[in-house]
Image (tube, helix red, strand yellow):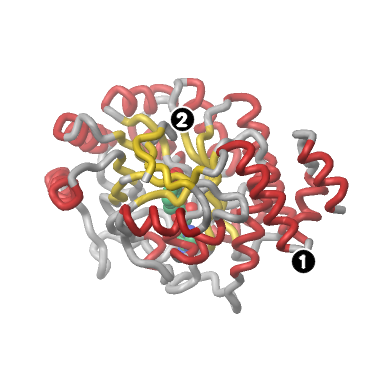
């Protein structure tokens, strides 16, 4: 099987869904990793990227109850919180004082029952006016859909307003698994996979780059994963708007979907198959928050070329028991990359090189 796939990959030919599934079913993790690393080097040379960023989650109050989510709360429930715009500004200021600068702020929230779209626009405008040099990556397709329904604006109008206020790029969250049967099991209230893809398509048409994710390791099958990757690959053929793909390793604690075992090899496989199958998405992120620092480092030899970033204080995965620290320093990221035999490259949000470490 690998001989045919190796031959196709060397010729730059696209893998079929059947070949993608066969790769997931292989036990030959070494050959899989070797091939994925080869492709990663062809696209990104020996570089591995990270960004100086901060994740901010303005609220965990959410009208949805996704079964995999340990972060969401109802208003008034213990642990529910709401940040004001001043709180967010002060968090960013503290980080700037501590590490000197931030290249990107990544903002993802719950679907708050009371906050208006205008509040989010004010939030973005205020961040942009106080920190003009920080790139704002904000709001998943799920939130964009919610804003549009709340405000009565079309997706195009909603995104145009956000772009004008200062959003430059959308994070890839909320994609979960596109297959409707699985999606209805794990997040029945969430927008459909089709809607997620539609919203990304509008963003790309407006010139807003986005990322894409896939939540794996819960109740989905390899076939569901390949179907998911295939839908992303199709949209990318059409728009070219995805910058990076991030497989999100399921964190099971405090959630309603229990899984019996952890599986590091499945994490490495998923990174490798993503690199081999998504021949048109330039970057594959090993999200160190969900993989843990050491496994994320190893993933750099299995097709990943990016470790996300400094993050500062992660909340979503840590509510569900993520095995990592909540934030990491630049020297630590550079060390993980260098020791994997790659060149540590600090990037901006669009993968332009800021500094080689
Ligand atoms: O949308 C929620 C997922 C996402 C769990 O675009 C869970 O650069 C695992 O999208 N186990 C948020 N995953 C994180 C995200 C992200 C992270 C880093 C970079 C980027 C990017 C995007 O986390 C959610 C959801 O899909 N999630 N709960 C859980 N228990």
**Quarter for ligand 1?**
bottom left
Q: Residue furthest bottom?
A: 260
SS of the residue under disc 2 = strand
- Which residue occupies 60% across, 65% down? 218
Is there any visible trace of residue 135 in the rendered image? yes
Mark-to-mark CA distance, 2 and 1: 36 Å
The residue that disc 1 covers is 27
Please tell me how crowded label 2 is: few (under 14), some (14-19), or many (20+) other residues with Cα within 10 Å.
Answer: many
State the residue in front, 272 or 91. Answer: 272
Please state the horizontal and vertical placement of residue 277, each as a whole percent of the image. 70, 43
State the residue in front, 264 or 81. Answer: 264
Tag 2 and tag 1, C-beta contact below 8 Å:
no
The residue that disc 2 covers is 209
- Which residue occupies 61% across, 50% down? 303
- Which residue occupies 27% across, 53% down? 59
Q: Is residue 85 left or right of residue 321?
A: left
State the residue in front, 274 or 47. Answer: 47
State the residue in front, 298 or 16. Answer: 298
């Amino acid at each position: 099987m690998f001989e045919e796939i190796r031959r196709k990959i060397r010729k730059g030919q696209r893998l079929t869904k059947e070949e993608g599934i066969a790769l997931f079913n292989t036990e030959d993790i070494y050959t899989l990793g070797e091939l994925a690393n080869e492709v990663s080097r062809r696209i990104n040379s020996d570089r591995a990227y990270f960004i100086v960023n901060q994740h901010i989650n303005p609220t965990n109050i959410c009208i949805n109850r996704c079964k995999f989510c340990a972060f969401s709360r109802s208003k008034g429930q213990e642990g529910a919180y709401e940040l004001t715009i001043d709180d967010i500004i002060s968090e960013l200021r503290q980080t700037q004082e501590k590490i000197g600068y931030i290249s990107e702020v990544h903002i993802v929230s719950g679907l708050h029952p009371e906050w208006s779209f205008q509040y989010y626009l004010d939030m973005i405008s205020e961040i942009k006016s106080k920190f003009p040099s920080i790139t704002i990556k904000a709001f998943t397709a799920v939130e964009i859909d919610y804003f549009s329904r709340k405000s009565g604006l079309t997706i195009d109008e909603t995104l145009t307003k956000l772009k004008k206020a200062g959003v430059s790029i959308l994070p890839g969250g909320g994609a979960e698994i596109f297959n409707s049967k699985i999606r209805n099991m794990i997040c029945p209230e969430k927008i459909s996979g089709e809607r997620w893809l539609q919203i990304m398509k509008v963003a790309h048409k407006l010139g807003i780059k986005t990322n894409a994710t896939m939540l794996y390791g819960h109740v989905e099958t390899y076939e569901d994963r390949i179907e998911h990757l295939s839908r992303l690959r199709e949209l990318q053929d059409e728009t070219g708007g995805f910058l990076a793909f991030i497989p999100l390793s399921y964190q099971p604690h405090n959630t309603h979907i229990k899984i019996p075992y952890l599986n590091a090899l499945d994490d490495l496989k998923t990174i490798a198959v993503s690199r081999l199958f998504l021949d048109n998405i330039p970057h594959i992120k090993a999200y160190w928050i969900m993989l843990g620092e050491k496994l994320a480092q190893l993933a750099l030899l299995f097709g990943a070329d990016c470790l996300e970033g400094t993050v500062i204080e992660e909340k979503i995965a840590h509510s569900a028991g993520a095995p990592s620290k909540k934030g990491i320093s630049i020297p630590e990221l550079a060390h993980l990359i260098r020791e994997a035999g790659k060149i540590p490259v600090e990037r901006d949000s669009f993968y332009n090189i800021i500094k080689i470490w």
